[in-house]
Amino acid sequence: ANTMIEPEAIERLVRHFEDPEVGAVCGKLRLYNPTKQDYEESAYWNYESLIKMYEGRRGAVVGANGGLYAIRRTLFTGLPPSTIVDDFVIPLRILEKGYKVVYEETAVAHEETTEDYGKEFGRRARIAAGNFQSLRMVPGLLLPTAGFPAFAFWSHKLLRWCAPALMGLALVANVFLLDSMFYRFTLFGQALFYSLAYLGKLGVLKRGSAKRVASVAYYFVTMNLAIVVGFWRFLRNTQRAAWDRTARA
């Protein structure tokens, strides 16, 4: 177990089931790093938690924090043994049935981040493969007739999974637009960003804001590369469903 749940968290989750329209409740997962206060994943996770909060107000949280969520027993349906990210698919199926999935930010659990980028890359690639797999498991959420849950699914998840392709397209298209000063500037910006990511990988910047920016750029690029790897594994059906715990400090 790598998730430490605060007292009263379960009680705060289950109280939402007094509303018969609520099918699942997602708690708030707080990540921490025992060796440094600012770390690459913190900005991403804070943004992700903010999105969940606003989705929860509309009863349409897309996916749950696997370490802390609850569902109505009557709404559970068995998953195929090959399911890679069950904590993503289960709430989506509940949304697909027309029930609300809400967010309870006072139900808190804590999970330690990892310093091993190789392990983290593998975890992200596994999640990405599972995300693409989920598309055929919840087809109803891809249709506009699903209303706001469909909008949340497309805007929060599907467009994000397209980011690597869009990044590549932006870079290639930019090369063919260099007759414009504006696009020369944007190409310089892209080159600078990827250069910072490479410096972040090398770890040559030891302190200050430059190190922080380079580290975030490296994290962003590697996590999008993990989506590409996950997509390739999905196409080849080579991603195992079993989960391997990421080593912590």
Image: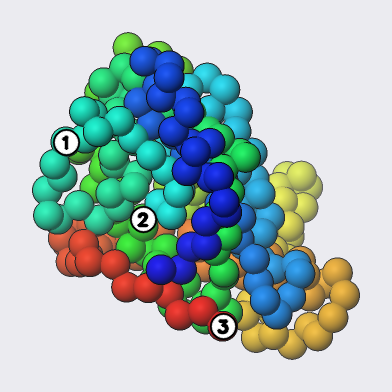
Q: Nearer the viewer, residue 204 or 90?
A: 90
Instruction: Find residue 249 and name its label.
Output: 3
Residue 170 left/right relative to 140: right
Residue type marked 3: Ala
For the point 34% across and 20% down, the residue is 99
Q: Position of residue 111 (x, y in %)?
A: 55, 63
Cα separation, mark 3 vs mark 1, equals: 36 Å
Label 3 close to label 2 by CB (< 8 Å): no
Instruction: Tell me the element at label 3.
Output: loop
- Say which residue label 1 marks: 77
Tell me which numbered mark, 2 or 1, is placed earlier along the sequence: 1
Looking at the rendering, which quadrant does residue 241 occupy? Answer: bottom left
Tell me which numbered mark, 3 or 2, is placed earlier along the sequence: 2
The answer to whether residue 190 is above or below residue 95 is: below
For the point 55% across and 75% down, the residue is 114
Instruction: Tell me the element at label 2.
Output: helix
The answer to whether residue 120 is above or below residue 129 is: below
Label 2 close to label 1 by CB (< 8 Å): no
Q: Position of residue 211 (x, y in %)?
A: 79, 75
- Say which residue label 2 marks: 128
Q: Nearer the viewer, residue 75 or 146?
A: 75
